[in-house]
Amino acid sequence: MTAAYDTDNVFAKILRGEIPCHKIYEDADTLAFMDIMPRGEGHVLVIPKKPVRNVLDVDEETHAAVYRTVRKLAPVAVKAFRADGVTIQQYNEPAGGQVVFHLHVHIIPRFEGVPLKPHTGQMEKPELLARNAETLRAALA
């Protein structure tokens, strides 16, 4: 049994408009935006709009909606950054590496010979995030 959903987590605040984000894509069920502590250039997060802690408590329709958006954006991220591949990651509970307790999927464009940056907690410059967001939105159009 997982813990209860925390309505004050950072992604819930983004969904309520209390915290800004560099939005890439939005539909009725999901939101995609730039990770402010990216592990690689073009690192995007996809979240459900529904309050779901992680894959251990997500309903089938919400899970499918999230992965439809992941499937839509992953090739766009590869194209936009001329990447050699893409890493898709999703963590569940502290032992599984989850830090923000709202279901989210990482889309990280990858380049041959370039390792992922460590998750240091260091925020990226807002102007670089804005530029990368624009690159992704242009590739999506």
Image (spheres, helix red, strand yellow):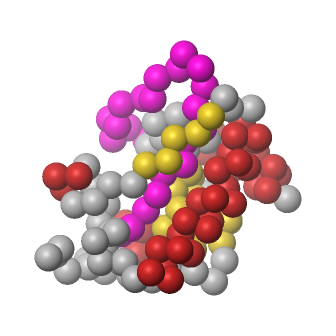
Which of 57 and 10 lies nearest the eye of the viewer?
57
* Whole-percent x, y for residue 86 in the image: 58, 39
State left or right for residue 81 relative to residue 55.
Answer: right
Which of 4 and 59 lies nearest the eye of the viewer?
59
* Whole-percent x, y for residue 4 in the image: 20, 80
Residue 139 drawn above or below residue 6:
above
Q: Main secondary structure of the magenta part?
A: loop
Magenta-drawn stretch contains 99: no
Stretch of the chain drawn in magenta: 102-124
Furthest toward the right, the residue is 141
Residue 13 at least partly seen: no
Q: Quadrant of the N terminus?
A: bottom left
Residue 21 drawn above or below residue 117:
below
Q: Residue at x 85, y 59 (%)?
A: 141
Which of 68 and 102 lies nearest the eye of the viewer?
68
Which of 124 and 101 lies nearest the eye of the viewer?
101
Residue 4 drawn above or below residue 127:
below
Q: Residue at x 59, y 59 (%)?
A: 70
* Whole-percent x, y for residue 133 in the image: 68, 50
